[in-house]
């Protein structure tokens, strides 16, 4: 490393949601903080989130809304900093907001209001805050005196280094695997990153479903793990009752995005296509009545009563039973309640809203986010193996993990 290093109490890598929230907490404690961001502006993912209105938290935040190899890890931070705390901050800045379905909170106007709020909080003091943009080619060294960060904007030194560089999702926004590389550099384990909250791709015979591109319907979806003793898949993760959207490549919509976080290659995605009909033979009751017409036209009519027209016609052609017996109709009904799709993959990190996996939580202190074997080194936000459900939970994890870290600096 060359040149005269600039000295701070804390260096934070990444000026996203977690990095800026952590910086604001540290400056409140009187710390001298430098935030290094490799993009030309801060908070790029904040600005595009929620369709530009930032789904900044969820009122129903709870540990069971998060995935991790250690499902208990997030409990401490989430209890420390709850949605009501962030909402108090939003209201203090008089940012208009509204609640959508399932407890999701959005700005009434632009997501920029959240970014401006975070930057204003960082500048409150009594500590000092410096934002360094276009900090590229970052190299880290560590010795008994702390951390040296050498980059295109110079050399920086501090006793504390916080890594808030996120995951691999949405690379066009500048996402990289830097956090994982750095974790491995310091001997930390990394749970293999994978796309989460991501559309699924259908191929082969199932590619015919893509002819329904643009059709949306309420479903119940869940991921199915292969069972070693039964041909029927068992449940992997919770069931999600929301909209499913057929796309030109496969399946998307909130229900599928949620289930995708639990899905693994080679496993089915199981979908109740008619959740409002309930179990049993109620949906096809008109065909089971005596006397009643039993043919594909009658089946289409029954399905059209509860499903979008194009989907109803497609399903009628696919599930039309041979013989039209009571047993065959009941089997068709049961299939509608547990339809198995067999995705051949996801649309990858380019379309994933978040990255699952990350720095192994066994190597972190759950109360502070500090690494167990490298004092002064912290990992927060999406870089950590904690992944929230769709609907503001990942922002809440960013705020909560950042506050836990910031208050420990």
Image (cartoon, grey):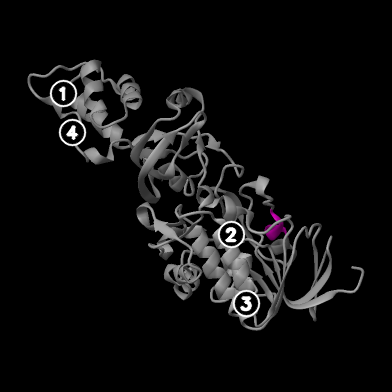
- CA separation, marks 3 and 2? 26 Å
Location of residue 165 with respect to 31 vertically, above or below: above
Looking at the rendered structure, the secondary structure element under dot 4 is loop
Determine if residue 192 is in view.
Answer: yes
User: At which x and y percent is residue 373?
Assistant: 67, 75
- CA separation, marks 1 and 4? 10 Å
| Residue highlighted by disc 2 | 382
- Majority secondary structure in the magenta region: helix
| Residue highlighted by disc 1 | 287
User: At which x and y percent is residue 21?
Assistant: 59, 69
User: At which x and y percent is residue 133?
Assistant: 75, 60
Q: Tell me what residue is drawn at x 54 percent, y 73 percent.
A: 366
Tell me, for residue 281, which label it has, or none. Answer: 4
Q: Tell me what residue is drawn at x 53 percent, y 67 percent.
A: 399
Disc nearest the viewer among 4 and 2: 2
* Left or right: 340 as drawn, with respect to 21: left
Q: Residues within 10 Å of mark 1 (few under 14, many from 20)?
A: many
- CA separation, marks 2 and 1? 51 Å
Q: Tell me what residue is drawn at x 54 percent, y 76 percent.
A: 367
* Left or right: 351 as drawn, with respect to 55: right
Q: Mark 3 and mark 4 in contact (Cβ < 8 Å)? A: no
Q: Earlier in the sequence, mark 2 or mark 1?
A: 1
Residue 364 colored in magenta in the image = no
Q: Tell me what residue is drawn at x 58 percent, y 57 percent.
A: 112
Q: Mark 2 and mark 4 in contact (Cβ < 8 Å)? A: no
Disc nearest the viewer among 3 and 2: 3
What span is in magenta?
Answer: 177-181
* Left or right: 381 as drawn, with respect to 137: left
Q: Residues within 10 Å of mark 3 (few under 14, many from 20)?
A: some
| Residue highlighted by disc 3 | 124
Disc nearest the viewer among 2 and 1: 2
């Amino acid at each position: 490393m060359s040149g005269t290093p600039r000295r701070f109490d804390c260096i934070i890598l990444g000026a996203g949601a977690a990095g800026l929230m952590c910086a604001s907490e540290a400056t409140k404690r009187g710390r001298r903080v430098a935030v290094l961001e490799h993009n030309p502006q801060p908070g790029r993912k904040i600005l595009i989130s929620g369709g530009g209105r930032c789904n900044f938290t969820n009122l129903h935040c709870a540990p069971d809304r998060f995935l991790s190899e250690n499902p208990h890890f997030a409990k401490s931070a989430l209890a420390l900093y709850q949605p009501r705390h962030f909402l108090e901050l939003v209201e203090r800045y008089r940012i208009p907001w509204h609640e959508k379905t399932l407890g999701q909170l959005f700005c009434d106007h632009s997501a920029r209001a959240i970014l401006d709020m975070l930057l204003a909080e960082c500048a409150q003091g009594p500590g000092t805050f410096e934002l360094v943009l276009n900090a590229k080619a970052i190299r880290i060294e560590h010795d008994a005196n702390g951390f040296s960060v050498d980059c295109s904007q110079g050399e920086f030194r501090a006793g504390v280094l916080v890594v808030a560089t996120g995951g691999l999702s949405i690379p066009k926004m500048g996402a990289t695997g830097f956090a994982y590389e750095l974790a491995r550099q310091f001997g930390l384990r990394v749970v293999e990153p994978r796309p989460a909250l991501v559309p699924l791709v259908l191929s082969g015979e199932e590619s015919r479903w893509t002819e329904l591109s643009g059709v949306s319907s309420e479903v119940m979806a869940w991921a199915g793990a292969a069972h070693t003793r039964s041909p029927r898949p068992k449940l992997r993760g919770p069931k999600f009752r929301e909209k499913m959207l057929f796309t030109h490549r496969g399946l998307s919509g909130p229900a599928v995005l949620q289930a995708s976080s639990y899905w693994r290659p080679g496993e089915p995605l199981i979908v109740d296509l008619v959740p409002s009909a309930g179990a049993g033979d109620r949906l096809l009751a008109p065909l089971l009545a005596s006397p009643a017409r039993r043919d594909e036209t009658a089946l289409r009519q029954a399905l059209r009563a509860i499903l979008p027209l194009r989907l109803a016609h497609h399903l009628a052609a696919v599930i039309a039973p041979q013989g039209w017996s009571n047993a065959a109709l009941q089997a068709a009904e049961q299939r509608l309640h547990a339809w198995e799709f067999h995705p051949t993959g996801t649309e990858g990190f380019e379309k994933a809203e978040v990255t699952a996996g990350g720095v192994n939580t066994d190597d972190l202190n759950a109360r502070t986010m500090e690494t167990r074997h490298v004092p002064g080194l912290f990992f927060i936000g999406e870089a950590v193996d904690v992944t929230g459900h769709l609907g503001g939970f990942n922002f809440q994890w960013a705020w909560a993990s950042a506050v836990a870290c910031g208050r420990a600096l």
